Image (tube, rainbow, N blue to C red):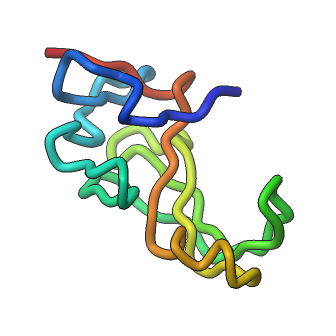
Amino acid sequence: MGLLFVETLPGPKVFKCKLCKVDSASQDEIVSKDFQGRVNVCLGPNEDRHLLSGLHTVNDVHCSSCQQILGWRYEKAYEESQKYKEGKYILEKAKVMKVG
């Protein structure tokens, strides 16, 4: 499962849900150095998960149309070095596609 790191993906400007093709995020609205972006999604409930970078409270990110899970949003980081992730989104490469 790959993660979407926007700074490595030059080219088309819109990310769509691979399943239903609804626009999910605009590359122009994502600032990779700050991991900020505005997305067209629904968020699931808070859930504690042990990720590679430690324990985080996250919300699954669902497509607003078909409810496919596209990634997650960091709600809370428990380690001080990971606090910069709070409020930021991760989109999985396998769940989204780029179009121009």
Q: Quadrant of residue 26?
A: top left
Eyeballing the image, is 73 above or below 3? below
Residue 80 location (% of width, % of height): 69, 84
Name above or below for residue 35 compared with residue 81. Answer: above
Residue displayed at 59% across by 79% down: 83
Picture coordinates of residue 40, whole percent (x, y)? 26, 51
Taking the spot 51% from the left edge, 49% from the top edge, the residue there is 90
Q: Left of 29 or right of it: where is 4?
A: right
* Image quadrant occupied by the C terminus: top left
Position of 90 with respect to 58 (left or right) is: left
Residue drawn at 36 percent across, 34 percent down: 7
Can you say which quadrant of the picture contains the N terminus?
A: top right
97 or 79: which is nearer to us?
79
Residue drawn at point x = 60 percent, y = 74 percent: 45
> Is 53 rendered above or below residue 13?
below
Task: Pinpoint residue 86: horizontal percent, then vertical percent.
Answer: 52, 75
Is 47 displayed left or right of 14 in the figure? right
In this rendering, the answer to whether 42 lies above or below 67 is below
Q: Nearer the viewer, residue 81 or 65?
A: 81
Where is residue 97 shown, x and y percent of the image?
Answer: 37, 20
Foreground of the two, 13 or 67:
13
Count of numbered badges drawn on the protein: 0
In-image side of 62 versus 49 (left or right): left
Q: Quadrant of residue 6?
A: top left
